[in-house]
Amino acid sequence: MWILGISAYYHDSAAALINDGKVVAAAQEERFCRQKHYAGFPLQAAQYCLAEAGISLDEIDNVVFYDKPFLKFERLLETYHAFAPMGFRSFMTAMPIWLKEKLFQKRLLVRELQTLAPQFSAEKLLFSEHHLSHAASAFYPSPFNRALILIMDGVGEWATTSVMLGEGNTIQPLKEIHFPHSLGLLYSAFTYFTGFKVNSGEYKLMGLAPYGKPVYADLIRKHLIDIHDDGSFHLNMRYFNYCTGLTMTSRHFERLFGRGPRAPESEITQMDMNLARSIQVVTEEVILKLAAALRQEYGIEHLCMAGGVALNSVANGKLLQSKIFDNIWIQPAAGDAGGAIGAALTGYHLHHQKPRTTTHAALGGDSMQGSFLGPSFDNTDIMQRLDKLGAQYQALDEQSMIEHAAQALADGKVIGWFQGRMEFGPRALGARSILADPRSAQTQAVMNLKIKFRESFRPFAPSVLAEDASEYFELAGDSPYMLLVAPVCQSRWRQLTTEERSVAGLARVNLARSDIPAVTHVDHSARIQTVDAATNPRYHRLIQHFKQLTGYGIVVNTSFNVRGEPIVCTPEEAYHCFQKTAMDELYIGEVRLLKPK
């Protein structure tokens, strides 16, 4: 049975294809249309999924959309009614779009699908609820037969936080927190207030937090959010404008903190750093209280997570360290893109009542296949594409390619690494990555400013051999999807001099805090990806060879893109990104390109 899942019309639209419950292909539309966080119909992503399987849309049993537009419209109307007469401008902005497009999304979807198959019938189209799609994406690919599922994001139709029980092929809702009370939107309000873009800049806020102190945490608890002992919460809507306005925060929010929102691209102040740290601390408190209460109430040892808040890898790391749950599994595409996988799986397991198996131990314990679900290119295709560009390159065998790449890293060079199937989700996991030596204190600043063209404070993640992870990090278990932050082992810390300890603000990024300074954040933590030989054998061999040369089984890994652009998808995009940055060498399949050439 073939089922296509679709996520679209908000942000990060995507398509995913499953066959008899197994994920065959999944990709975000942004990687094809080259518009970051693209929200329209994922036409090219759907075409890719079908081509990967070698089938047409006519052979699909169902297409499942990831949420229910009518329920969202109901929430919109009820919210405007509850806050009237406030929000009239916002209402007049939103209504024409809803009445013209979103209210008739079924018709719009059918029309889009008929561009792929003119005879496509509306009877094949199913709709899942937003948080159910997230829950399915978290539970069904997980290694657990029975688990609690925690979904936290901005808002679905009505729910902002959901708790469900996954058992076998079933998912049962247990409890919810409804809009406008949202942990995701609270975090996004601070993202907006500190000058970053909502729905994409939240990870910048998380990266900024270690530079600050939680001096506003009590103010947030006193005025903005009432946190109960069981982790449930209530926001004081006086301070927020997202229900009916065109901004996230209100004038009362500005008065509370004594200023307005930071202008985008302006100087980041110590206040911004302190705001970031404060909301991060409060977010962690909510998640830990919620988790502890759920474990006590239901007595279930496993937890699955999805939704945008589940991309907060710092909070995830604290949750793992707390040992509240015996095991945690987080959907690597935890945001809305992952809803495409969840929608397809709800169609298979819930609508068609098909059974589920969890025998995936050989692939890291889950059925996401390392999240390598996107397009790949063989060496002949790669060389033909490079020839059309007039590129000069060396064709190598795999062993020579790995040896050259590892030596380049050991020599302090920055390399592009384009191998196998593209990752699904926001993280580069060694298929579309830029790699460097973690031993250099200058690597972070050089990569941010000369290659990524982004803020200097942004941390880089380590990819570490799974079998060596405990030598570098205080991490219990694996972290294959780069969704957990853990401390660097104290034995690797470097004692700062008196002069270094006096350095303040973002200048602290240049201080070497450990013997792997390029991946050690200012609070001695790191966002870790563990690499195992079964899931990504070529990447594992590269890091192994780097270890033979240097003694370190770890490299710096960041996504293969520059600021403002999606991660590269094709060899041509990799080549162009290589040409316009200070990367030294590029490896596409078994082809090597050198910058002087």
Image (cartoon, grey):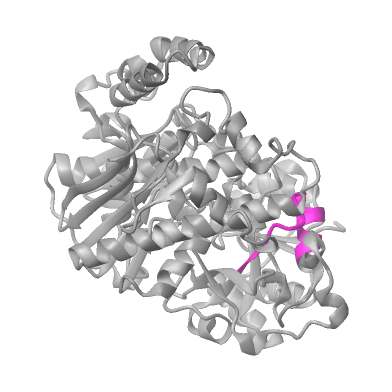
Please give left or right for residue 105 compared with residue 273 in the image: left
Give the residue displayed 59% in from the left and 84% down from the top.
489
Q: Is residue 39 left or right of residue 208?
A: left
Q: How many numbered dots are placed on residues in this image?
A: 0
Residue 393 on image: x %, y %: 75, 57
Magenta residue check for 445 = yes
- Position in image of residue 508 (x %, y %): 79, 67
Quadrant location, the N terminus: top left
Assess whether residue 348 is covered by the magenta stretch: no
- Say above or below: 48 vs 287: above
Q: Is residue 373 visible?
A: no
Q: Nearer the viewer, residue 300 or 466?
A: 300
Q: Where is residue 387 shown, x and y percent of the image?
A: 71, 46
| Quadrant of the snapshot with the C terminus | bottom right
Instruction: Depth check: give the residue in front, 449 or 371.
Output: 449
Q: Is residue 159 visible?
A: yes
Residue at screen point 13% across, 54% down: 355
**Apparent side of residue 577 relative to residue 183 in the rendered image (left or right):** right
When the figure is inspected, residue 189 is found, relative to residue 105, above or below; the finding is below
Q: Residue at x 59, y 51 (%)?
A: 203
Could you say which is closer to the camera, residue 56 or residue 1?
Answer: 1
> Is residue 337 placed above or below 81 in the rendered structure?
below
User: x, y percentage for residue 143?
Assistant: 28, 66
Which of the pair 75/7 is nearer the observer? Answer: 75
Residue for point 24% across, 70% down: 301
Rendered image quadrant of residue 234: top left
Quadrant in the rendering for residue 286: bottom left
Specify start and end residues of the magenta stretch as a single range.
444-462
